Image (spheres, rainbow, N blue to C red):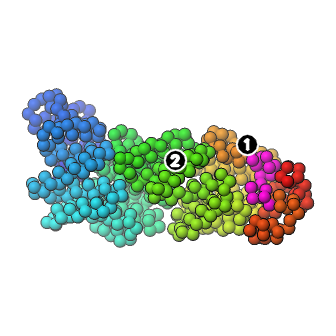
Amino acid sequence: MPTRASSSVVERLPYKEEVRGSIPRTPTEIWPRETRLLGRPYRKAMTTALGRGRRWFAERAWGDAYTELSEADASGVLELEDLERLALAAYLTGNDDAATHAWTRTHDEAIKRGARERAARSAISIAGGLSFRGEIGPAAGWYARAGRALEACDECAELGLLQVMRAMDQMFAGDPQAAEPVLADGLLIGERHGDADVQAIGRLGQGMCRVMQGQRAAGIPLLDEVMASVTSGDVSPMYAGIAYCVTIMACTEVFDLRRAREWTTAFTHWCNAQPDLVPYRGNCLVHRCQIMQLDGAWTEARREAERACSYLAGPIKWEALGAAYYQRGELQRLRGDFSEAEQSYRLASGEGRQPQPGMALLRLAQGRVDVAVAALRRVLGETEDPPMRSRMLPAAVEILVAAGDVPAARAAADELVKIAAVMDAPYLHAVAANAEGAALLAAGDARAALPKLRAAASAWRDLEAPYEVARVRVLIGRACLAMDDAETSAMELDAARTAFEQLGAKPDLEGLDARAGSAGGLTPREIEVLKLVASGRTNRAIAKELVLSERTIAHHVSSILTKIGVPSRAAATAYAYEHGLV
C-alpha cells in the first residue's frame, strides 16, 4: 500500500503530494510521468481504465479508483505500483477480500523481485486491517510473514512499522506496560528513516499506553501531536484512520469531551472528503452520535446511530457494532421507544458490548425498579476499574434513590466524587455533583443538596449538555419546593419542561407530570411508604413488609414530610387521603 517510506509507492510516484492531501489544479501536474511512460497524449491515456483509476486514486475517490483499477486488472496484469493502489482502494471502500487478495499478490510479486521491504509492507497492511477488525489470529500470521520478509534487513522503516503495529495489538490485549518500550524502539526507527506512518503509530501507541495506565497528562499531548501530523496530511489514509479512531477513543476514555468533540469534527470532515470511505466510517458515526446526543441533537444523533449500525453490521461485522447498537438504544430509551431500545440493548449484548447501565435505566423507566437495582448491583460487583465504575455509578444513584435505598445511593455518590477528584475531568465533576445533590435531596437534606445541584447545572452548561441541564433543574426545583420557595421551583420546572419538549424526551415529560400530580414530587417508593404510614403501620412494620431497614424507612418518612410540607405522620396521613393515595 502507499506509504511514506523511501521504498514506497508514494515516494516514488511524482503525484505523492495528492496522496498526502493537496490536489493539483491541472491534470498534467498529476500525470506527466505516466503520460511519458504510456507513450501517448494525456487525454488518450485518461480514456483507459488504468489511467482513470490512477487519477481517481490521486484524488482520493476510492470507489471510482477501485472500479477502474479492477477493470484494468481484469484486462491484464497490473504493475506492482498499480496493484498496490488497487489494494488500498479496495480496503478503503470496504472490499476486504479483494484488498487482501491484491496485497497478497503484491507481497508475492515483491518477494520474487527481491523487494523484501515492499513485500513486508503489504503483509503489514493485511495484518493491520485484520487487527483493526478484531481478527487477531490471522493478523498475527501476516505479521509473521512480514517478519520473515525482513529477516535480512538490519534496519528499515518497515521493521519499525512491524514493531509498532505488533505492539499496538499487545497494548489492546491488555498489556500497555510491556508494549510501550517496543513502541518507543519502533518510533526511533521511524524517526531515523523519516517515515511519517511509523512515527504516527508509534506516538499513538505511546500516548494510548500512558492513558491506559492512568497517565493522562503524559498521554494526551502525544495523541495531539499525532493528530497534528494526520490533519496536515503527512500520514497515509489507512494509518490516519486508525489514528483518528484511537485518539477519539482515548479522549472518551478519560472523559475529555472538549478534545473528543474537536477530533470527532475533524474526523467527520476527513470522512466526508472521501465519500467512499468504509472502514472508519462506522466508528466515526458512533463517536459523532455520542457527541450529538450530549449536544442535544437527538434526531440527528439517532440517524447517525442507524447509519453506524448499517455500516458496521456487514458484510463483515466490526468490533464497534456493539457500541453502535448500544448508542441507538440510548437514544430510543431517551425518546420513550422502550421496546425498540430493549432490542438494541440486546443486540449490543450479542456483539459483546455490556448493555448496562442503559438496560437498567430502561427497567427503571418501565417501573421495574427491583430488576434495575439487581442489574446495577451485579455489574458494580463485577467492575473494579474506576473509569468503568464511573459510567455505572450515576445510574446506580438514580435507581437506588427510586428504590428508596438512600444510604446506598449516598455511598455510590461519594465514590463518584472520589473518582472525579482523581481523574479531574470536567464531565466527571458535573456527574459527581449531580449525583451527590440527588442523594442529599433523597435523604431529605434539600439545603445541603441545593449548592451541589447548582454546581452541577453550571458544569453541564459549560459542557453544552442541554438534557443534563434540564434533568438537574428538575432536582433544583424539587429542592426549592422542599425549602418552601414555590416560585423558584416553578421556574426551574418550567425551564426543564421546555427543554424536554424541544429534545423530545417523552419519559422525562411524563415524569414531570407525575410529580405534579403527586403535589410533592414523591418517588414511587415514597408513595408506597406514605400509603403504609397512612394505614397506621410503624416504621418497623413498614420495614418488615418492604424488606428494608428501619433506618431506610426513617429516611423515607423524613423525605416525605419535607416534600409535602407537613410536620407529622398524622398530617401526612391526611395528605394521603386528600390526594387520593389511600
Which callout, 2 or 1, points to the residue nearer the camera? 2
Give amino acid for label 1.
Asp
Taking the image as shown, residue 438 lies to the left or right of residue 290, namely right
Looking at the rendering, in which quadrant would you find the C terminus? bottom right
CB contact under 8 Å: marks 2 and 1: no
* Residue in front for this viewpoint, 364 or 406: 364
Query: Which residue is found at the position 70% from the left and 58% from the top?
Result: 402
* Residue in front for this viewpoint, 364 or 59: 364
Q: Main secondary structure of the magenta part?
A: helix
Which contiguous range is marked in magenta?
A: 513-529
Residue 166 position in % (x across, y down): 30, 64
The residues tagged by marks 2 and 1 sit, at their Cα atoms, a distance apart of 29 Å
Does residue 457 appear in the picture of this structure? Answer: no
* Residue in front for this viewpoint, 519 or 164: 519
Q: Which residue is labeled 1 in the image?
A: 494
Residue 234's place in the image compared with 539, above or below, is above
Residue 175 position in % (x across, y down): 38, 69
Taking the image as shown, residue 399 lies to the left or right of residue 186, namely right
Query: Which residue is found at the position 74% from the left and 44% from the top?
Result: 513
Q: Which residue is labeled 2 in the image?
A: 328
